[in-house]
Image (cartoon, rainbow, N blue to C red):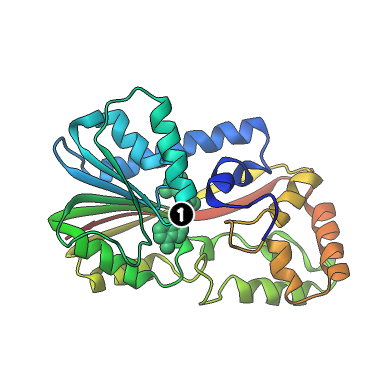
Amino acid sequence: MSEICKNWSTWLKKTRFSYMDEQQKEQTLNWLIAVRDSVLNLADLKEGQKIADFGCGSGLLAFGVLERFEDKVELIFSDKFQDCLDECKKILNETNIKNNAKFLISDVSDIKLEKNCLDRLMTRSVLVHVKEKQPAFNEFCRILKPTGIYAAFEPIISENTRYYELLNSNQISDYNDFQKAEKEFMENPNDPLVNFNAESLDKNLYEAGFTDVTVNVQEAASKYIPTKEAILNWLITPPAPDQKSMKERFLEYFDEKKVDNFILEVQNALSQKEVKITSKTAFIKAMK
Ligand SMILES: C[S@@+](CC[C@H](N)C(=O)[O-])C[C@H]1O[C@@H](n2cnc3c(N)ncnc32)[C@H](O)[C@@H]1O
């Protein structure tokens, strides 16, 4: 694991933004706020409800609930990792916001709550880190009350633009080998980041027992004129604390000299040129 990426709260605060300049950081924060508000709106929150944010991280969704409802809802911050809950507690203590909040350390695949106990359950970018998604959805359905709602956001990374799609075969030595490797690891059924799409999420949710499921996929196109440094950072930044960077993934196929040469060639091919990347995301609403 990378030294710059020791645990989730550090990754959430520092690593995920490490390759961005100030303007990109601001755009990303604005995007996160828009995503948060969409998930909260989908959840149809109301006063008096018992609401949980699972895989809360630094509390993006949960603090959004507090901003809207303060102590007029019961709110659970839950995460698998204590460092995330500690971070949320620290932020909560630093604010004067009235609250009725609890903290629950729990894996989404085995939630320490009784059945039918929540009105609303939300997640953002959590299932993308869980290898087996069905047990988590089963748990969500179990702990929601009848007529309860699950609302979520997930990036569909398996359908993002790939490096080989941005490059021409004459720009990269052994282009076909790198294309084959990237295709293989971006379609690895054992990799939680890429082993799902909108159809599999829909299927998982119905199988878990939800009765009315909407998985709304949105495609966004972004344009960048990256520097060589930014390209290097794309390739060496881990997508999660426990996940390999692109460079580390290529190192499973090729030796370091060959991968470093690939990185140089990618930098030469793409730096100071307009790069267009599309990414897909899913907004999910499931009623029990
Ligand atoms: C990308 S972060 C998202 C954090 C937060 N939901 C947000 O929107 O900023 C993923 C979060 O999922 C948590 N997580 C990963 N695997 C989990 C699991 N199996 N059970 C519960 N939480 C998990 C991590 O600790 C991390 O806080």
Q: Position of residue 17 (x, y in %)?
A: 62, 42
Q: Position of residue 107 (x, y in %)?
A: 38, 62
Q: Is residue 246 positioned above or below 148 on the image?
A: below
Q: Position of residue 224 (x, y in %)?
A: 67, 43
Q: Which residue is situated farthest in the left direction here?
A: 146
246, 217: nearer the viewer: 246
Helix, strand or loop under label 1: loop
- Locate the N terminus and report the quarter of the image it occupies: bottom right
Q: 10 Å neighbourhood of mark 1: few (<14), some, or many (≥20)?
A: some
Residue at 49% from the left image edge and 48% from the top image edge = 83
Quadrant containing ligand 1: bottom left
Q: Quadrant of residue 20?
A: top right
270, 252: nearer the viewer: 252
Left or right of 48 in this view: 113: right
Amino acid type at mark 1:
Phe
166, 68: nearer the viewer: 68
Circle 1 residue? 81
- Locate the C terminus and report the quarter of the image it occupies: bottom left
Q: Do we see residue 219 in this rendering?
A: no
Residue at 36% from the left image edge and 58% from the top image edge = 106
Q: Is residue 263 positioned above or below 225 on the image?
A: below
Residue at 69% from the left image edge and 77% from the top image edge = 180
Q: Is residue 285 positioned above or below 250 on the image?
A: above
**How many numbered discs, if any?**
1
Residue at 23% from the left image edge and 45% from the top image edge = 51
Left or right of 235 in this view: 131: left
Instruction: Judge: label 1 CB < 8 Å from ligand 1.
Output: yes
Left or right of 160 in this view: 165: right
